[in-house]
Image (cartoon, coloured by chain):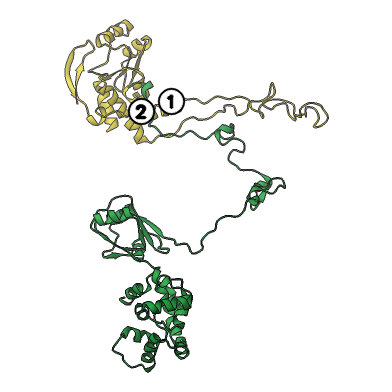
Chain colours: A green, B yellow
Amino acid sequence: MRLNELADNAGATQKPTRVGRGIGSGKGKTGGRGVKGQKSRSGVAIKGFEGGQMPIHMRLPKRGFNKPNRLKLTELTIRRLQQAIDAGVLPKGELDAAALVSAGVIRRGLHGVRVIGGGELSSALKLKVRGITKGAQAIIEKAGGSVQVIEEVPAKPEKTAKPAKKAAKAEPAAKKPAAKKAPAKKAEAKPAADKKTPAKKAPAKKAAAKDGKGDDLTKISGVGPVFAKRLNGEGVMTYADIAGLTKARIAELDEKLDLKNNIENDDWPAQAKALMGK
Amino acid sequence: MKCDITKLDGKTSGSVDLDDAIFGLEPRKDILHRMVRYQLAKRQQGTHQVQERGDVSKTTKRIGKQKGGGTARHGNGSVSQFRGGGKAHGPRVRDHSFDLPKKVRALAMKHALSAKAGAGELIIVDDVTLKAAKTSDLVKVLEKMGVSNGLIVGGRELDSNLSKAAQNVKNLDVLPSQGANVYDILRRHTLVLSKEAVADLEARLK
């Protein structure tokens, strides 16, 4: 080895940036120190100013909007799951958003977790998530795991504080619709509730009707607080009520409440049945 | 690592066992490069200086007026764009050396010795003494050993006959064992170590 053959490793030293040596260097005119005067202040609108002519960003019409209640799902890659497995931080059993957060795999759940592909999985996982890509599902099932996709947003914790108040309030409210109108279906439900005698048929219906309010119909996809109120007004209080709707009754409700066929489109009876099971 | 010991007349006389941790490494040119740069930077005197604006003797009287002169405005004659003005950002007296950890420096020495041993450019002789301070004698000895460009490292005390004889030999350096260093080893093609030098170096780099 001679002196002329010596060299340091590639990348061992870095040449210093030569500031203020021409435009081509990218650190020419102001040498990375920004500008002075008005343009250096915050909140200056001089950038879009075109000398008094209506500037382009005001000349063109507004377009588009931001959906305020956009569904925000936390993306979770298979690779990240594998890392967690390797680190041994994943709990056993079913993995939902809360479990993943407490394990430190994701920082927060937002509206739910969506699993996306990329990487390989070594062990079987049981996931309960809001969404999953086809590729990710294939990877998980190949590893022997299973995925359950939940439809609705998990209930917010604030709801737990309210029921006591609502139940008290709902007692008189429940009586009103009974007095007003009594279509065939509701007439059945109401007397049972009023008497508070054990009815052998439809125990779920009765139990729910007992505390006056009925079930939380907003849990059904497609039913918001407004529709729930309207349904209550028609005497539909519980999941059992919805599950037991006849075709004629559905048509009637649709007509009356202006539901636009949503009962059939979203298949509320089936959803209600599923909720009854819980 | 076994290595033959030769005499100055070219005959072999036994062998010596060299430490693989010092002579048997795969040479790393990045470490050698850093060490050579360290040595060269450290030896640079750094006594370079020119006159800058403040050093030039010029009158501080204003040249012309600020306005109405019809020519460019100037305040001082010592500025760099004038003839006789000072130099902008000229060299100043300074120390060019930089730090390199002691362990890296020691490692570089090992790699330099290993580089020579690995390339077959290492000759070990039992003794480096000459009977007389004659350059012609030394040249004959070097021809026998096949050294045209080399460094001879003797013991802690150099033979005065040898150092005198080597003064006017082209491409030949002579150093005592404590003076052996990476730059001088790499600068010459063949490295000639005396038995005493090998012992000294191994003790130093242990």
Q: Provide the secondary structure element on which disc 2 rests.
A: helix
Up-down relation of residue A176 to residue A248 (above or below): below
Discs 2 and 1 share one subunit: yes
Q: From this viewpoint, which residue is outermost toward the top?
A: B136
Q: Provide the secondary structure element on which disc 1 rests.
A: helix
Question: Between residues A227 and B115, which one lies in front from this camera angle?
Answer: A227
The answer to whether any part of residue A154 appears in the image is no
Badge nearest the viewer, 2 or 1: 2
Toward which corner of the image does residue B185 lie, by quadrant?
A: top left
Disc 1 crowd rating (10 Å Cα; few below 14, some 14-19, many 20+) is: few
Quarter of the figure with the C terminus of chain A: bottom left
Chain name for mark 2: B
- Amino acid identity at mark 1: Leu
Q: Could you tell me residue B153's position as x and y percent?
A: 30, 20
How many numbered marks does the figure carry? 2
Q: Could you tell me residue B180's position as x and y percent?
A: 34, 24
Toward which corner of the image does residue A202 lie, by quadrant?
A: bottom left
State the residue position of label 1. B40
- What distance separates the C-alpha of mark 2 from that of mark 1? 12 Å
Say left or right for B51 vs A276.
right
State the residue position of label 2. B32
Q: Could you tell me residue A198's position as x and y percent?
A: 31, 91
The answer to whether any part of residue B86 appears in the image is yes
